[in-house]
Image: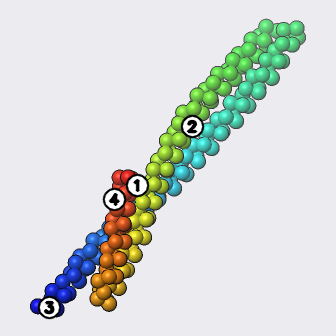
Amino acid sequence: MGTENKEAWLGYLALATVIFAVCATLSTFKWSSFSTLSVMSQSQASDQWSHFQSKGIKAYLYQMQAEKMEIELMDLPMLSSRETVRIYKSRVEDYKNRVERYESEKAEIGVKAKQLEQVRDEAQLHANAFGRALIYLQIAILLSSIAGLLKKKIIWYGGMGTGVIGLVCFVDGYVLFL
């Protein structure tokens, strides 16, 4: 009976190690998932910002063309027919409308890009928490394994402490309280 009672803690060690291993496995999957989401969101946000810049360039080009035509229009009445003046005015108006449209589209694109950056930032927070959990849980598994092999409770206590930190980080990966 002395040996059974003396070795009973090894059952708890095995159970704790299994719990740590399951949480470490889940942390790996969740870390990978959130890391992928972070990278994809960053890529999409970058695409949106590129689109934003292209709209800005187009708006600038149309603005410059409208200004150039307005300057030319000042000299046209003396040199050209009314039809030519009307065409110039129509084109200037069209260019100004395009500038307004591009500026409006830029605003929408900017909002979308910022939303994607928020998704990226939140995914990074989750991924970091699961990454920390994975490290602590792996250390806990290692210490528990060594404790079981050497039958040293003190090493297992160290593993349990590390494992508890890992479990807190694991839960934090879901709810982000740290």
Label 3 sits on a secondary structure element that is: helix
1 lies left or right of 121: left
Q: Which mark is residue 178?
A: 1
Residue with the mark numbered 4: 171
Q: In which quarter of the image is residue 80?
A: top right
Residue at the extreme left of the image, as rendered? 1
Which of pointers 3 and 2 indicates the residue nearer the eye?
3
Kind of residue indicated by mark 1:
Leu
Disc 2 marks a residue whose amino acid type is: Gly
- Which disc number belongs to residue 2? 3
Residue drawn 29% across the image and 83% down it: 153
Residue 29 seen in the current view? no
Q: Which of marks 2 and 1 is nearer the N terminus?
A: 2
**Measuring 72% from the left and 19% from the top, which residue is drawn there?**
91
As drawn, is 54 to the left or to the right of 165?
right
Give the spatial CA distance, label 4 vs label 2. Answer: 34 Å
Residue located at (53% from left, 36% from top): 111
**Looking at the figure, which quarter contains the C terminus?**
bottom left
Closer to the eye: label 4 or 2: 4
Q: Give residue 27's position: percent from left, percent from top.
A: 37, 65
